[in-house]
């Protein structure tokens, strides 16, 4: 048991280091720092490592449905369309932090982690986000084949089209490209709209819940204050009664002259 736990810790440590390395490497590529050829080789190598890791875990897991849901960001992190998808691997770090209860060890667990879990899973955000990314990625790939464009330019076109920005710097010219664009306009815009409304509904309901909790807490504090005032008033009345009784006793015991 101890050997298995030690091996798990070593494995998770390696995943953490490789994840951070991949994110830093992609950041350097985006900022155009260092050798682009070397960084691209590193990015592709890490992509292969994470892809093998993902499919091995998929094969050995006992519940593939739960695995696919919880590892949606891992799948997005191994999409070979653009190195920037490596940033999705950070979701793996969050799960590892929760697995080892690091939030609890650091004293920041509780409401924050519950709110994160509720936002990601219970609101359906992870499903809508995954479907939206899948539609954009698939459309970009098909657009690249039909229009003979690079994957990076195709991804840019898919994002600007799905978000209804539409700069017009990349447009379809072939019949297949226009069909892909139509599919993306209807499917992508619909799911992204649902995604946006889900985010807005979560924060709106969160703000409403906080306001309600604050109001309930104020009412509870007011009830406690009134209760304490009633208890204090009762004690004051009892004290006055004792003082009056004491004064009467004193007058009876005082000899008259």
Image (cartoon, helix red, strand yellow):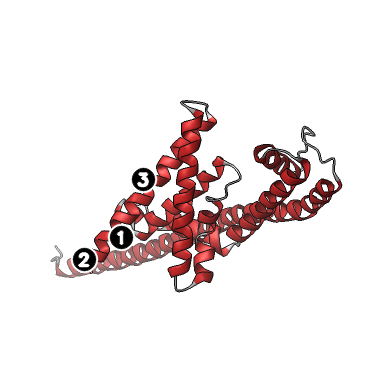
Point out the tag, 3 or 2, that comes first from the N-terminus: 2
Point out the tag, 2 or 1, that comes first from the N-terminus: 2
Residue 98 percent location from the top left of the image: 39, 58
Give the quarter of the figure containing the C terminus: bottom left
Which type of secondary structure does the marked residue at label 2 adopt? helix
Task: Give the CA separation, mark 2 to mark 1.
Answer: 10 Å
Residue 196 vs 152, above or below: the answer is: below
Task: State yes or no: discs 1 and 3 in contact (Cβ < 8 Å).
Answer: no
Say which residue appears at 79% left-offset and 50% top-offset. 180
Say which residue appears at 47% left-offset and 27% top-offset. 35
Q: Is residue 135 left or right of residue 10?
A: right
Point out the tag, 1 or 3, that comes first from the N-terminus: 1
Say which residue appears at 48% left-offset and 38% top-offset. 41
Task: Give the CA separation, mark 3 to mark 2.
Answer: 23 Å
Residue 178 percent location from the top left of the image: 84, 47
Mark on residue 17?
Answer: 3
Circle 2 residue: 2
Residue 247 vs 52, above or below: the answer is: below
Crowd around label 1: few <14 · some 14–19 · many ≥20 (10 Å): few
Say which residue appears at 44% left-offset and 63% top-offset. 57
Q: Nearer the viewer, residue 255 or 80?
A: 80
- Count of number-bearing discs: 3
Farthest residue in the bottom direction?
62
Circle 1 residue: 8
Image quarter of residue 191: bottom right
Task: Give the CA separation, mark 1 to mark 3.
Answer: 14 Å
């Amino acid at each position: 048991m101890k050997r298995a736990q030690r091996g798990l810790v070593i494995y998770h440590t390696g995943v953490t280091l490789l994840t951070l390395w991949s994110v830093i490497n992609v950041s350097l590529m985006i900022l155009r720092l260092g050798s682009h050829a070397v960084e691209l080789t590193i990015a592709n190598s890490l992509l292969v490592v994470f892809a093998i890791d993902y499919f091995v875990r998929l094969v050995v897991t006992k519940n593939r449905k739960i695995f696919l849901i919880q590892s949606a960001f891992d799948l997005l992190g191994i999409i070979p369309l653009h190195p920037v998808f490596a940033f999705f691997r950070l979701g793996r770090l969050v799960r590892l932090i929760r697995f080892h209860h690091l939030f609890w060890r650091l004293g920041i667990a509780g409401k924050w982690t519950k709110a994160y879990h509720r936002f990601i899973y219970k609101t359906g955000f992870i499903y809508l986000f995954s479907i939206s990314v899948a539609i954009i990625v698939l459309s970009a790939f098909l657009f690249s084949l039909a229009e003979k464009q690079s994957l990076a330019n195709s991804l840019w076109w898919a994002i600007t089209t799905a978000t209804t920005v539409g700069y017009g710097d990349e447009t379809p010219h072939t019949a297949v490209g226009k069909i892909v664009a139509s599919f993306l306009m209807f499917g992508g815009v619909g799911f992204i709209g649902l995604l946006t409304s889900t985010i807005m509904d979560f924060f709106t309901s969160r703000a409403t819940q906080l306001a309600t909790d604050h109001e309930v807490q104020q009412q509870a504090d007011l009830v406690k204050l009134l209760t304490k005032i009633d208890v204090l008033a009762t004690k004051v009345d009892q004290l006055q009664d004792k003082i009056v009784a004491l004064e009467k006793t004193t007058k009876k015991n005082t000899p008259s002259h």
